[in-house]
């Protein structure tokens, strides 16, 4: 189930934030709105890394404990640095993966940021 379908089922307005988590090689997670893509250069700037790239799919489950489509930072095997795009802060509710494909959690962005000890930064760019 894609993020737009989940939003529609939950009867949320279309401007709500549906996060897409991306596991990265630099032991970080990036969270951006589902209708954008992660700006790797911007994220590298905030992490202090020279370069950031997405973790290859074959390494995702070993690194996170989750399969593709169910990756969430909420209960990962390790404590990862988490960077969340600033657009999350203007929403009343955000949607994040609940750790299984097709299962989502709806919560206030402040609660998510606090739970994952996230840092907010402009890390998304339009598709």
Image (cartoon, rainbow, N blue to C red):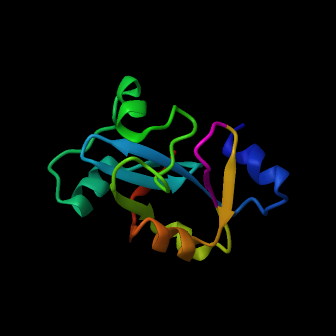
- Of all residues, the one furthest to the left in this rendering is 50
Which residue is at 51% across, 49% downward? 72
Judging depth in this view, the residue of 126 and 66 nearest the camera is 66
> For the point 49% across and 37% down, which residue is it?
66
Measured as percent of width and height from the top left, residue 80 is found at: 33, 55
The foreground one among 108 and 125 is 108
Q: Where in the figure is residue 63, as x and y percent of width and height?
A: 35, 37
Q: Which residue appears at 62% of the width and 49% of the height?
A: 98
In depth, the one of 39 and 72 nearer the eye is: 72
Q: Is residue 58 above or below residue 21?
A: above
Q: Which residues are magenta?
A: 95-101
Whether residue 106 is in magenta: the answer is no
Quadrant of the image for the N terminus?
Answer: top right
Left or right of 71: which side holds 52? left
Occupied quadrant, residue 79: bottom left
Q: Quadrant of residue 14?
A: bottom right
> Is residue 13 shown left or right of residue 107?
right
Q: Position of residue 64 (x, y in %)?
A: 41, 41
Left or right, residue 43 beside residue 70 = left
Q: Identify whether 122 is placed above or below 111.
A: above
Asked where in the image residue 100 lies, by quadrant, the reply is: top right
Residue 99 colored in magenta in the image:
yes
Q: As displayed, is residue 45 above or below residue 78?
A: below
Give the residue at the far front of this rendering.
77
Q: Up-down: is 58 above or below 27? A: above
């Amino acid at each position: 189930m894609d993020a737009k379908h989940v939003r529609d089922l939950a009867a949320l307005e279309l401007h709500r934030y549906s996060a897409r988590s991306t596991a990265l090689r630099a032991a970080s997670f990036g969270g951006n709105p589902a209708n954008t893509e992660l700006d790797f250069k911007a994220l590298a700037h905030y992490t202090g890394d020279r370069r950031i790239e997405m973790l290859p799919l074959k390494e995702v489950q070993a690194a996170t404990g989750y399969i593709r489509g169910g990756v969430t930072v909420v209960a990962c095997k390790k404590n990862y640095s988490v960077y969340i795009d600033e657009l999350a802060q203007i929403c009343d509710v955000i949607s994040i993966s609940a750790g299984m494909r097709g299962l989502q959690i709806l919560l206030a962005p402040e609660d998510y940021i606090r739970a994952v000890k996230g840092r907010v930064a402009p890390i998304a760019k339009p598709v």
